Image (cartoon, rainbow, N blue to C red):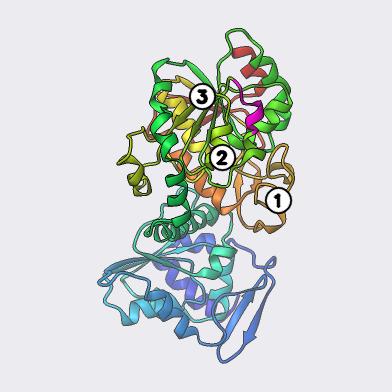
Amino acid sequence: MTDLFTSNIAIIERRWPIVAATIKSQSINHLDSHLVQGQNQTISVNGIQLSSRHDRMAEVNLNIDQLPSHSHIVHLYGLGLGDLPRELLLSYPLEKLNVTLLNVAITQLVLSYTDQTDWLSNPKCELHLATPESTLILPFITSSAELVLADDDGAVLRNKILIHYQTLFAARSHQTQDPQILARFQQNTALVQQDDDVSELYLVPRQQVIVVGAGPSLEAALSQLECISKRKNRPLIIAVDTALKPLLQNGIRPNIVVSIDADINETHLLPTQSAGINLVYFPRLSSEVLIRWQGKRFVAYGKHALYDSLRAIKHHDTLYTGGSVLHPAVDLAVKMQAKEVFLIGCDLSFPNNKTHTCWADGELNMHIASQASHQWVLNNQGKKVTTSLSFISYIDALEAYIRVHPNTVFHTTSTLGAKIKGCQHMDIKNLRSKL
């Protein structure tokens, strides 16, 4: 224990005793840390610098400039080297600064080798521990280093921060109409006018609906799903587009396929094998693929203003979009008045180090090797499973959808896939006996 740590922790013990006890309980022996000297000095932890070694204050000011003007209450996620809270409290007219620690061991390291007593003593400052239940509150800034280095308790909050940034980026990218998508809309004008509306599928209520994704766990469920699909009074089966290939290869013909992505083509939709299968599509798909579909086609829109040009041509109902084709597939099941929705192959993660069933690594523009090791979620066994930032945002959107549909019971059959709040686990064998 250093003299600096003793001085720093004394203030924390006086003001936030629970936070102090947690910090003191940590070990820093597992951290690969050392000083890095440039124009400024910083600390490197596990290969990540906690601040710039060239111009720490320029980095701080760049970060603070992200805040809306006249921000009187600010939330800071991640301590870094303490430059951000110090500058915010000493130089900005804040009423309150909430500092949430994303990695407690790194906090102990920083408190051991740097003096943080000035801002820790400031009555405007409040110190918090990140927990899996922590919420993201605006306006905020964050230590970019600790977004990578967040510990297990800070990982959920880290994910929420990354999703927030991703959403902002996506919103900016949609501020102007995508000329390629608008060209697709123009190509599909005749189809939009002649094809049926997705709402026609709502007319026949369904008590139980199976929604099939192409996640790695689908492979182990195919034999059971095949038996279910052969029953005379089988439940309705809705498949996402990338799940159609493994289903057909195993003699399973879904009732409905949902497709929304402009990159989906005949390799995924297999139109020559589509007789008798309904296709629910967003008009972003290639008209050549749509025309070749042998079953009935139903048009759906997203709620985004991007679809306003099509709404002016002909009204079609909207399906929920949260970034993945899984979301409109689930929304379709609910709008068909399903009392129970069973998710099969909807892993939203990479169990067994695979991305999808039936598709090789990279075939669906997703590579295991490119996934950051710090991006993970808990599966239905309570174990960590690697995922992607996109999948994390899809989980978040699906959980939000489930929360506002309390009259529908959601089940997932995979123990290896991501745990989805509000979704009960049911073994595929039990599902077969239930249906």
Does residue 376 appear left or right of residue 18 in this picture?
Answer: right
Does residue 117 appear in this view? Answer: no
Q: Is 37 drawn above or below residue 49 in the view shown?
A: below
Mark 2 residue element: helix
**Above or below for 425 versus 382:** above
Tell me, yes or no, whether the two marked residues, 3 and 2, touch with CB atoms within 8 Å: no
Residue underneath mark 1? 362
Query: Which numbered tag is attached to residue 234?
Result: none
Return the residue at label 2.
288
Q: Disc 3 designates what residue?
A: 296
Q: In percent of the image, x 32 and y 34: which residue is there?
A: 315
Q: Is residue 297 above or below residue 49?
A: above
Image position, residue 153 (x, y; %): 54, 54
Left or right: 267 with respect to 169? right
Residue at the extreme bottom of the image, as rendered: 39
Circle 2: residue type: Glu
Magenta segment boundaries in residue numbering: 270-275
| C-alpha gap between disc 3 and disc 1 | 31 Å
